[in-house]
Amino acid sequence: MIHTSRKSGKKTNSDKAKPAVMDNTHSDKVTEASFWEKVKSSASAAGHEAIYNALILYYTARAKDTPIWCKTVIAGALGYFISLIDTIPDLTPVLGYTDDVAVMIAAIGALAAHITPEIKQKAKQRSDKLFQK
């Protein structure tokens, strides 16, 4: 995508921008730390499926061959999962994480061609470990 900067009036290529989830900058570490904190703190309430889906997205974002547009979709889906602002609050019994799961499933559907069997296996192993299966 080509956008015009408001400050300089010059055209910039926004496809080169990396989502915060993927950069190795200091601000990324906060985002990654927030992701792992959310996974650990919400595992029992969110359930195995939600955590498994979050891990699929996380590992897909970390894969070197994943295109930028996929990483952007993933950043949005995981950002929604981490966010305290939800359509259905996460503390709501039974329904709390259904919107998070729906957003993650939609993201997985959009970028399914970029999710490798290795990524699925790694996500399964990590989610099983978290749930001690």
Image: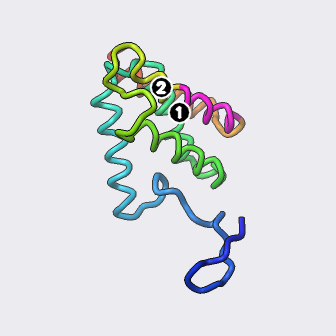
Q: Which residue is mark 1?
A: 56
How far apart are labels 2 and 1 at the CA level?
6 Å
SS type, badge 1: helix
Q: Pick the residue in front: 64 or 68.
A: 68
Q: Residue furthest bottom?
A: 8
Q: Is residue 35 left or right of residue 117?
A: left
Percent across and percent down for residue 1 are 71, 64
Q: Which residue is mark 2?
A: 52
Q: Secondary structure at mark 2?
A: helix
- Disc 1: CA contacts within 10 A as few (<14), some (14-19) or many (>=20): many
Instruction: Pick the residue in front: 124 or 45.
Output: 45
Magenta stretch secondary structure, dominant? helix
Q: Which kind of residue does numbered mark 2 sit on?
A: Tyr
Identify whether 93 is placed above or below 34. above
- Residue 9: x and y in percent read 64, 84
Mark 2 and 1 residues: CB-CB less than 8 Å, in contact?
Answer: yes
Quadrant for residue 5, please give it.
Answer: bottom right
As drawn, the residue found furthest toward the front would be 87
Residue at position x 32%, y 16% in the image = 132
- Residue at 35 percent across and 55 percent down: it is 29
Relative to residue 115, is residue 30 depicted above or below? below
Res 83 → quadrant: top left
**Viewer-proximal residue among 101 and 29:** 101
* Quadrant of residue 74 within the rendered picture: top right
Question: Crowding at label 2, few (<14), some or many (≥20) Cα neighbours within 10 Å?
Answer: many
In the rendered image, residue 49 lying in the magenta stretch gets the answer: no
Q: Amino acid at mark 1?
A: Ile
* Quadrant location, the C terminus: top left
The residues colored magenta run 102-112
